[in-house]
Amino acid sequence: MFAFLWIASLLGIVLLMYMRYEASLNRLVRHRFLLNEYPAGEEPCTFFFISDIHRRKIDPGLVEEATGKARFAVIGGDLLEKGVPLSRTEENLRLLKRIGPVFFVWGNNDYEADGEALAAVFARTGVRTLRNAADFVCVNGKKRIALIGVDDLTTENENLDEALQSVQPDDLRILISHNPKMIHQLHEWDDIDVMLSGHTHGGQIRILGLSRYRRGGVRKARNVIHLISNGYGTTLVPLRLCAKPEAHLITIESNRRPS
């Protein structure tokens, strides 16, 4: 019996060490999305997407891997949570600014921070916040990519109609919603091309491959390319199992040949 308990304890320690190791990984997952709406013959547009940073410090090597390839960076919510020093958050944002302009969409845990203090950090770092609003980047000086951010569903303050007010019919539309359940509120006439989400952490700890949430990945739903990220950080415990952390390098381009 003593030997069994000793072996079980040793295996438990090894498992915890592995889960801590998995939670500390730095993976940059690459995606290529082909869209009819993207101008044929134009250079592809590549950008960086990260969500659910929580308590982690972003690894400089991860940012370096995207720098020079991505035109801008998008944070898909849960930049931080209660108890995270704002100095760490500001350090993460300044690191992401090496990539280019940074856009931020609110997640549920972001509301645990001091709102005024966080707004001051955004002002100092030049981060653009998208709360039921859109901002734009240009493909070729004419065609615009609309980055459309909605507030987190947990707050029940999401308003896609408000976010779309400044978006024109011929704009390519990328919707950023921290909570992936926003997909169920989309209508055909919203004309969303790509949706980016986080929140679920891919289940974070999957026992025998099972969890409350599915692993992250790319799926087609309601004619929308929907990326749900495993996220970069952790919540409650700094552990992961079978749901490796990730950030994303996303390239969008035309699936049409130039005429």
Image (cartoon, rainbow, N blue to C red):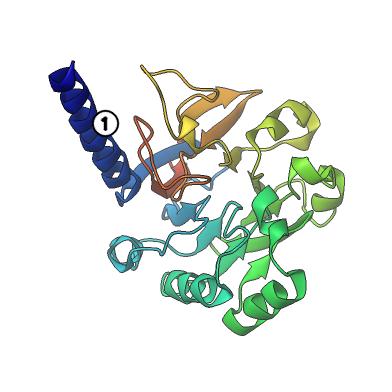
Q: Mark 1 points at which residue?
A: 12
**Residue positioned 35% across, 32% down in the render:** 241
Q: Name the spot of residue 204 as percent of width and height, x first.
A: 45, 35
| Residue at the far front in the pictured view | 2
Quadrant location of the N terminus? top left
**Residue positioned 34% across, 44% down in the render:** 29
SS assignment at label 1: helix
Identify the amino acid type marked 1.
Gly
**Residue positioned 47% across, 74% down in the render:** 97
Up the image or down, 127 lies above or below 132; here it is below
Left or right of 176? Residue 162 is right
**Is residue 141 in view from this perspective?**
no
Up the image or down, 123 lies above or below 142; here it is below
Q: Which of 251 and 64 is in front in this view?
A: 64
Left or right of 164? Residue 4 is left
Q: Which of 219 and 164 is in front in this view?
A: 219
Q: Name the spot of residue 238 as percent of width and height, x first.
A: 42, 48
Q: Name the spot of residue 239 as percent of width and height, x first.
A: 39, 42
Q: Name the spot of residue 207 as percent of width and height, x first.
A: 39, 21
Quarter location, residue 68: bottom left
Which class describes the residues within 10 Å of circle 1: few (<14), some (14-19), or many (20+)? few
**Residue positioned 68% across, 55% down in the render:** 106
**Is residue 246 in view from this perspective?**
yes
| Residue at the far bottom in the pictured view | 124
Q: Nearer the viewer, residue 231 or 227?
A: 231
Left or right of 108? Residue 197 is left
Q: Which of 237 and 49 is in front in this view?
A: 237
Quarter location, residue 83: bottom right
